[in-house]
Amino acid sequence: MTEPTISILRPGDTSKDDPFTICIIANPALEAPWQTGQFILDPISTDQPLFDRTVDYIQSCLFGLLPGQAEAPLADPAIEPKVRVVSIFAPGLAAEDKNALVANDSVSNQLIARRTVFSPFLARFGFHADVAYAVSNSAMHNRATAWFTSDDDARGGVAFTLDGVQLVHRFFNLIPGTVAIHATANSLTALHEFQHAISSYSNGSIVDLYVDSSPGLNCKRGRPIPPDFATYDGAVLASDPTRDGLGYESGWLSYHCALIDPSLPAVMDNYFLGSTPDACQNDEITRRFILDRLNAKLSR
């Protein structure tokens, strides 16, 4: 293996042994197609300038630096200086299972994060992530996807209530939130996928709103749409009866929480349909949840 380039782009909270960490990795190999055990080199593994540009884009999107960007939870002044960001470019790795962080889906143009490979891969370089991005330059697959975090529910956290049920913003994970993202990603894609990834299988999942999704923290199902969406930590949050101007599709049963800015789609909806996509914001429950979860993890 050629000597890797590892950059600490933001040091985060240097007083902590395990600060909240986002890792951005140049994907060495692709499983092509997914779940076949067949592997090829990812073109990004030989193109560090392209990887570096994608890293710059991801950072800009996460920290609210895109022109006109309105939603940027990591730009909160109480959060931003405590977030560590690491990039890893490790050329020369073999196209094999342990180096393939991303797969080409067999039935769509989606890139799929091979979530169980991330932690052992990062451990080889001395890192543990809360959220990890694998950047690909796959020739045929360019649509980003993410998996939620698998929380370590045997360890501590900060409790909260959702519709009277106690859940916990866990400090640690068993598997980090993982994102497969293409080198050509733009607009709010990096933030949209981060919000999936920082959420949790067991303590609140943030789902897509541009399809008739299964229930999640930010999505419920039923008709007629009730006036109240949820009670989050004692705060009663309203429903969105009109899907922020886009309108719920005919036959949908899912409905959403009221938006902070109802003039544009939600970040978790199809923000590209907004007149100014980068100005799209979250709904009320998503923003509260993400900020609370980040602050809990930063406090560990």
Image (cartoon, helix red, strand yellow):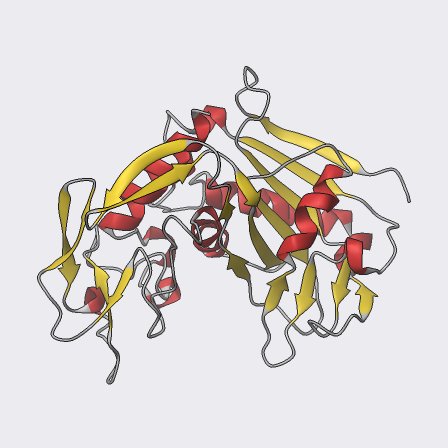
**Which of the 4 quarters of the picture holds residue 29?**
bottom right
Q: Is 136 on the left-hand or right-hand side of 193? A: right
Give the side of residue 42 with respect to residue 193, left or right.
Answer: right
Residue sitting farthest toward the right: 1
How many numbered discs, if any? 0
**Residue found farthest to the top:** 15
Which residue reaches farthest bottom? 251
Q: In this view, does 177 lie above or below 86?
A: below
Instruction: Identify which residue, 106 or 41, lies in the foreground.
Output: 106
* Observer able to see residue 52: no
* Image spot of residue 6 (x, y percent): 74, 34
Quarter where residue 107 is shown? bottom right
Residue 4 location, quadrant: top right
In the foreground, 231 or 61: 231
Screen quadrant of the N terminus:
top right
The answer to whether residue 299 shows anywhere in this view is yes
